[in-house]
Image (cartoon, rainbow, N blue to C red):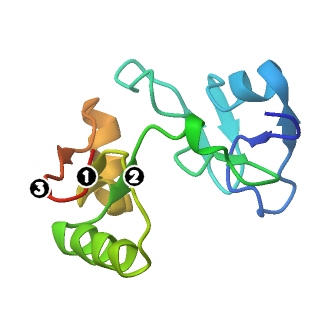
Amino acid sequence: MPGVLFSQRNAAGANAVHLSGVEGFRAIYAPVVVGKGRWVREGGHPPWLPTDMQAEVLIPDAVPLVLVSGLVVKSEDVAKRFLVQLRAAKTEFRLPIIVSGEMFDRSLVSRLRIGGRRPLEERYRDDRANG
């Protein structure tokens, strides 16, 4: 997408650098990232996780729905409430909803990173509306 920028760490942090293109994407997986702290990719660092967990992708506009593969929520309750709101607005939603309480727990994700394990994810099942 045009205008997308990558930040190796918190994009609003002091001296944060925003890079574009392949160079920017690769930068969030650099061997070492220095910001508020110093993050080093060590042997157990999962390849799918940026070097600094606070790396950000800055998108300047709406993301076309065809580029979205699903929605991650913290709990089944959040998924249910989301679908109730969509139904009330007579809005169809056909993307998978993934429940992952672990993904919303920053300290747990940090510990999982050390062990190389992804946060647990479970597809939410709703008989009426979830594709």
Residue drawn 33% across the image and 50% down it: 109
Q: In whole angstroms, how far apart are the C-alphas of marks 3 and 1?
A: 7 Å
Quadrant that contains the C terminus? top left
Q: Position of residue 29 (x, y in %)?
A: 61, 26
Which amino acid does the dot numbered 3 rest on?
A: Asp
Which amino acid does the dot numbered 2 rest on?
A: Leu
* Residue tagged 2: 71
Dot 1 falls on a residue whose secondary structure is loop
Residue drawn 33% across the image and 74% down it: 87
N-terminal-most mark, 1 or 2: 2
Dot 3 falls on a residue whose secondary structure is loop
Residue 1 shown left or right of residue 56 in the figure: right
Q: Quadrant of residue 66?
A: top right
Q: Quadrant of residue 84?
A: bottom left
* Residue tagged 3: 127
Q: Nearer the viewer, mark 1 or mark 2?
A: 1
Q: In whole angstroms, how far apart are the C-alphas of marks 1 and 2?
A: 11 Å
